[in-house]
């Protein structure tokens, strides 16, 4: 596969090039239409996030509006496959005002994606860690909150694109005892 990564800052280009990704500098907060930077991809992954330390306003402009702009770009560009990184427990927002805003923004993005005509998968990982990946996960609905290494989330995302049965699925994702390929088997 060839991969294009949309980034906000020029200084992020080398990191992407190093791993074989074509960097495209475009600020999804500033642009109203991101269809040109998205281009003619076969599939997209929304992995952007305002990040810790950002205020409530950026949760709307990145976590919700950025995801919706990508939906619009997919429709405009004829791309029908969309995978989004969401979050666990969005049905009951908790925490401080900024964290609650983040959860509501994510939930609204997910709902917009569900209501689009795109072939979607909504992946809801637990708290991300920088530990080494194990390739062992737990996938399901309403899992108990937990942690998962970023490398395992990345491996699941890569597998989702190769697993047609994940279209129309949404699931929680935490570390577990099941190999990724078996955990993503929705045929039973």
Image (cartoon, rainbow, N blue to C red):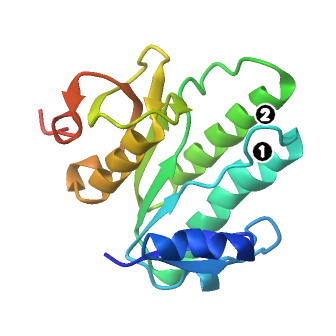
Q: Position of residue 146 (x, y in %)?
A: 48, 19
The residue at 44%/13% (across/down) is 144
Q: CA distance from mark 2 to mark 1?
A: 7 Å
Report the number of numbered marks: 2
Question: Which of the pair 53/88 is nearer the observer?
Answer: 53
45 to 188, vertically: above or below:
below
* Secondary element type, mark 1: helix
Question: Which of the pair 165/24 is nearer the observer?
Answer: 24
Q: Looking at the rendering, in which quadrant would you find the N terminus?
A: bottom left
Q: Which mark is residue 59?
A: 1
Disc 2, disc 1: CB below 8 Å?
A: yes
Give the quarter of the image for residue 70: bottom right
Q: Looking at the rendering, in which quadrant would you find the C terminus?
A: top left
Residue 100 in sight: yes
Q: Which mark is residue 96?
A: none
Q: Could you tell whether 159 is left or right of 83 in the image?
A: left
Q: Position of residue 103 (x, y in %)?
A: 68, 32
Q: Earlier in the sequence, mark 2 or mark 1?
A: 1
């Amino acid at each position: 596969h060839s991969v294009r990564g949309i980034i906000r800052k020029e200084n992020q280009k080398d990191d992407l090039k190093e791993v074989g990704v074509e960097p495209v500098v475009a600020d999804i907060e500033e642009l109203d239409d991101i269809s040109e930077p998205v281009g003619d991809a076969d599939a997209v992954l929304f992995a952007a996030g305002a990040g810790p330390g950002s205020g409530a306003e950026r949760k709307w402009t990145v976590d919700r509006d950025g995801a919706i702009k990508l939906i619009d770009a997919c429709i405009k560009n004829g791309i029908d496959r969309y995978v989004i990184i969401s979050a666990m427990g969005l049905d009951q927002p908790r925490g401080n005002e900024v964290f609650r805003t983040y959860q509501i923004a994510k939930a609204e993005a997910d709902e917009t994606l569900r209501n689009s005509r795109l072939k979607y998968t909504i992946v809801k990982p637990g708290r991300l860690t920088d530990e080494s990946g194990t390739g062992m996960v737990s996938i399901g609905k309403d899992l108990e909150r937990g942690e998962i290494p970023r490398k395992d989330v990345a491996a699941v995302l890569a597998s989702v694109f190769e697993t047609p049965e994940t279209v129309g699925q949404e699931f929680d994702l935490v570390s577990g005892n099941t190999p990724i390929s078996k955990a993503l088997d929705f045929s039973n």
